Amino acid sequence: MLQQLSELRLWDGTLADTTQDDTPSLKELAKRGDKAHLFYFYDLFVDVSCSPRKAPTAWRVWAEEAGESKLMEVDARRLAKKCLKVLGGEICTVS
């Protein structure tokens, strides 16, 4: 799920409140981007990436080319950090 969240792209403005007439805040501007859904999971990403316990892992098959696939181990901590990096990039592009 964390992998899918990091790759998901929303239509611009999907989560934005369009009823405001005044100058939008940084928070509202961030909700207009294609990665706005990540802001709702920020606390979860921090908790998972900073957890002192061993992160849950899973094996996933990645299809690189037609007929060719690769088995890869993924862990929740690394995926949560990836989501935080995407979120950080989104914040930098908003300002």
Image: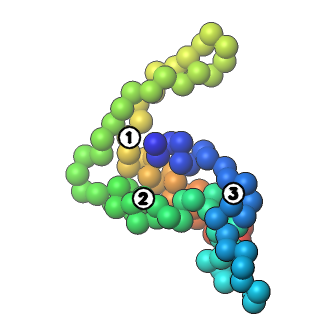
Residue 50 lies in quadrant: bottom left
Q: Earlier in the sequence, mark 3 or mark 1?
A: 3
In the picture, the disc for residue 34 is 3
Three-letter code, disc 2: Phe
State which mark lies toward you, 3 or 1. 3
On screen, residue 64 versus residue 39, left or right, reads right
Q: Which residue occupies 42% across, 36% down?
A: 74
Q: Is residue 71 visible?
A: yes
**Mark 2 and mark 1: span between their CA atoms?**
13 Å
Element class at badge 2: helix
Q: Which residue occupies 53% across, 65% down?
A: 39
Three-letter code, disc 3: Asp
Tell how many labels: 3
Instruction: Look at mark 1 in the image and give the residue it sits on.
Output: 75
Q: Position of residue 12 (x, y in %)?
A: 74, 60
Residue 32 lies in quadrant: bottom right
Asked if 60 appears above or below 36 in the picture, the reply is: above
Instruction: Look at mark 2 in the image and give the residue it sits on.
Output: 45
On screen, residue 71 versus residue 37, left or right, reads left
Is the residue marked by circle 2 packed among few (<14), some (14-19), or many (20+) residues within 10 Å?
many
Q: Which residue occupies 46% across, 54% down?
A: 81
Q: Earlier in the sequence, mark 2 or mark 3?
A: 3
State which mark lies toward you, 2 or 3. 3
Element class at badge 3: loop
Foreground pick, 34 / 90? 34
